[in-house]
Amino acid sequence: MEPGMAATPRWLAALVFAALASCGGSGGTTTGTGTTPPPPASAPADINLLFFGNSHTAGNDVPSLVAALVRAARPGRTVAAVNEPTWLFLDERLKHAPSKELLASRRWSVVVLQAQKYSSSGNFFYSTFEAAEWVRMARANGAVPVLFPEWPRRDLNESGDIFGLHLSIAEQAAACVPPIPQSWDIALAADPSLPLWASDGNHSAPAGALLAAMVIASTITGDSPAGMPTLASVSVDAATQAALRTAATNAVTAVPPRQRCPGDPYPS
């Protein structure tokens, strides 16, 4: 924990969450910080999405939500989303051979990058070189790089700092930056009762993951969240999904997600 902080730093909280998730269980493949399992089998599609992140990406399966929304926006096109299953911060991932091998394994349309460490207190500096290097590697692969700034933690005013940090990465190496923190602020300003957080006040609840996915999908396609469908596959009621669409629409209108990647193509 950073000296003088009342709350656990997000990067440390995610690490603890990952460690707990990798302990025991009722069968199946474990993720987290342990041995890397093979990535999910997925045949190349018309639109191929690759996700690198930690528990904030994996929680409530943000990649599948994004894929469902992109699929709805591009009818008749196939969409595949692959989430590299090891939970790592971007500085750690740069030394992770399986991640580099997965990036090189096919031509990706979009690479989504989450898990930049940051100092909540502002007293510490965590390198952003590694995140910028991932952006460069994604571009070298022919993919559009999308940074994933996380939502703020409950009761903390940190959206501006989180978003600004990711903009600073995009200034080093051009990347799209979806306004996910702003979308949460907008949604909660309209309805403070929206269940966006999990009980820890750090990770997402299903509604929060869907809101993040809406903003990411809009960043990828260029389409307004206002036209996104109600997803029957998630445990979020239709009225809440409508409120999330409004918040996502207002966020991408107020803070264009492609301000640092204006020349990148949209998948057709």
Image (tube, helix red, strand yellow):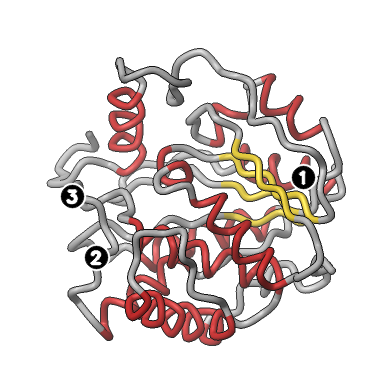
Q: Quadrant of residue 221?
A: bottom right
Q: Is residue 91 above or below residue 34?
A: below
User: Which residue position holds label 1?
Assistant: 138
- Which residue: 46% across, 39% down? 126
Q: Is residue 87 found left or right of 222 in the rendered image? A: left
Q: Is residue 264 above or below residue 12?
A: below
Query: Could you tell me which secondary element the residue under label 3 belongs to?
Result: loop
Picture quarter containing residue 8?
top left
Q: Amino acid at mark 2?
A: Pro
What residue do we see at 50% from left, 70% from top?
179
Picture coordinates of residue 149 (x, y %)? 48, 57
Q: Position of residue 5 (x, y in %)?
A: 17, 45
Label 1 environment density (alpha carbons within 10 Å; few <14, some 14–19, many ≥20): many
How much space separates mark 3 and mark 1, taking CA atoms?
A: 34 Å
Horizontal relation, residue 203 to residue 104: left or right: left
In the rendering, which numbered label is found on residue 195?
Answer: 2
Place of residue 36 in the rendered image (x, y in percent of width and height, measured from the top left) = 56, 18
